[in-house]
Amino acid sequence: MLVLVAATLVSVGTMAAAQEAAPPVVPGTPCTATATACVDLVGLRAWLFRDGQVLRGPVPISIGAGGADSTPSGQFQVEWKNKNHISGESGAPMPYAVFFAPGGIAFHEGNLQTKSAGCVRLAREEAVAFFDYLQVGDEVQVHDDAA
C-alpha cells in the first residue's frame, strides 16, 4: 500500500510538472509561444511571432487544394530558403520561398484566389516579410483545427 501511494505521488507530480511546462498558446492564434511562424488552415491566416508575441499578422493565405495537394499540419522547422525558386514539379515561380515541410512545402508569394499544390501562399509584401524574418531552424506550427 505504501509503495502504491508513493508511485501515485510521483506520477501526479510528474503530470503537474508536464502541465506547467507546456508553452502557452499565443492569444488569438492556434499556436504556442515556441513557434516563430503560425498557420491556421481553417481560418486561412498566418502570423510571425517573436518571443511568444505576435510580430506580424494575421495575414491572409492560400493553401493546398486537398488530397495529394493538401497543406500538411504539424510542427516543422524551416529547412532552407530560396528568393527566386522555381518549382521542380510544375515549373511555376515560387518567389521568396521558405521551405518548412517534406515534399517541398513552403511559404511563398502567390495568388491568394486559387489553391496551391500544398504550399502556403502569401501576398508579395507578406512573402517578403516571412522570407526576411524566418531563419533555418525556426519552428513553424501548422494547425487544421479551429483556433
Image (spheres, rainbow, N blue to C red):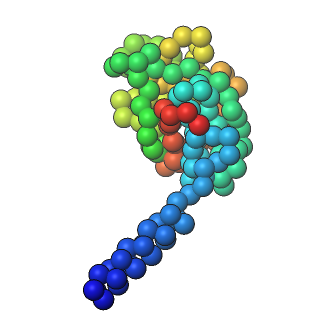
Q: Which residue is drawn at 35% across and 84% down?
A: 6
Q: Residue at x 52, y 60 (%)?
A: 22
Q: Tell me if residue 10 comes above or below residue 97 in the rendering.
A: below
The quarter of the picture where the C terminus appears is: top right
Report which quarter residue 130 is drawn in.
Answer: top right
Q: Where is residue 96 in the image (x, y as percent from the top left)?
A: 57, 28
Q: Residue at x 54, y 27 (%)?
A: 42
Q: Residue at x 34, y 19 (%)?
A: 68
Q: Tell me if residue 32 comes above or below residue 15 in the rendering.
A: above
Q: Where is residue 144 in the image (x, y as percent from the top left)?
A: 48, 32
Observer-nearest of 13 and 48: 13
Q: Is residue 97 visible?
A: no
Q: Where is residue 65 in the image (x, y as percent from the top left)?
A: 44, 15
Q: Residue furthest bottom?
A: 2
Observer-nearest of 22 and 94: 22
Observer-nearest of 82 and 106: 106
How many marks the image carries: the answer is 0
Q: Residue furthest front?
A: 1
Q: Is residue 119 visible?
A: yes
Q: Position of residue 143 (x, y in %)?
A: 50, 36
The quarter of the picture where the N terminus appears is: bottom left
